[in-house]
Amino acid sequence: MIIVTGGSGKAGRACVADLTEHGYDVTSVDLVPPADPTVRHTRVDLTDFGQAVSALGGIDERVSGVTGIVHLAAIPAPGLASNPVTFSVNTVSTYNVFEAARQLGIKNVVWASSETVLGLPFDVHPPYVPVDEEYPGRPESAYSLSKLLGEEMAKQFCRWDPELKIIGLRLSNVMEPDDYVRFADFQDEPGLRKWNLWSYIDARDAAQAMRLALESDITGAEVFVIANADSVMEAGNDDLLDAIYPDIPRKKALDSHETLLSIDKARRILGYEPRHGWRKPEHPPN
């Protein structure tokens, strides 16, 4: 049994669908019920430790034998709640999931960190492009700080238990297919999307990364940047960088539309390879 917390959100819906399609028994744990009535769901407030332990340990005949957790439940972006609420909800719920997993002997945890840990909205320029996991986190908001602290908590939980795996996925801006129509609005004003270096992640590819992380045999705490292989722009990277960030060092010659949030580590270790996106035949550029 795999529990997906936050299974009613954008990434959560895709994760539940992907795991189910690949033969996993899945339960969504969320305060919000799923739109799909066929999804097994239990309402749980993960900021309450007792509820977290109870849900992950078993819920009547609905949930038992949990072997893995995909923890996506959170306030999903800055500005949706006041800063103290965002920080409290995200850090406490993440701690509760990690600690409940530790107490219950669940060794396989994947969770949603965030691209914002890299320094978004990049008002202070990144040290280089493509940005990757190698430089220290630079949180610029209470939301981002909550995610960075989640990464640090994961390190300490895995130090306590060397058999534990906690993989944090620094997800880029999650998009569903219906969102691609809005990409036309970005093309004439590159500055509109400079805040995350013109990157995105198709929810279905985010779900692929979550499944691959669950299936990985690595142990310990790891983080991976997860983005699509391309940018949201028709303009090429060199033109975009020359116009917006001309002084940022470029670590290599850049393909015209390759992501500036490096996914090399996820490709190398997880076998991640994006399969969807707005340039695919079913989503032609406008």
Image (cartoon, rainbow, N blue to C red):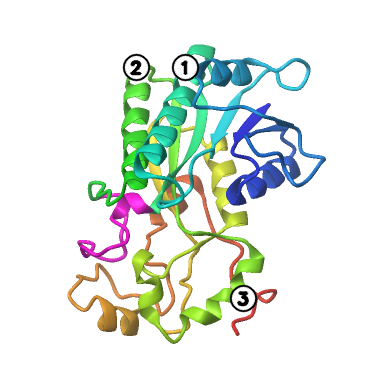
Badge 1, how many Cα within 10 Å: few under 14, some, many 20+? some
- Residue 129 is inside the magenta segment: yes
| Residue depicted at 40% across the width and 72% down the height | 193
Q: Distance of mark 3 from mark 2, alpha carbons?
A: 47 Å
| Residue depicted at 38% across the width and 42% down the height | 223
- What residue is pinned by disc 2? 160
Camera-nearest label, 3 or 2: 3
Mark closer to the chain start, 3 or 1: 1
Q: Residue 28 lies in what quarter of the image?
A: top right
Q: Is residue 243 left or right of residue 174?
A: left
| Residue depicted at 48% across the width and 38% down the height | 111
Badge 2, how many Cα within 10 Å: few under 14, some, many 20+? few
Residue 283: x and y, percent?
Answer: 65, 75
Q: Which residues are magenta?
A: 116-134
Instruction: Say what secondary structure mark 1 lies in.
Output: helix
Residue 200: x and y, percent?
Answer: 48, 63
- What residue is pinned by disc 3? 181
Image quarter where the N terminus lies is top right
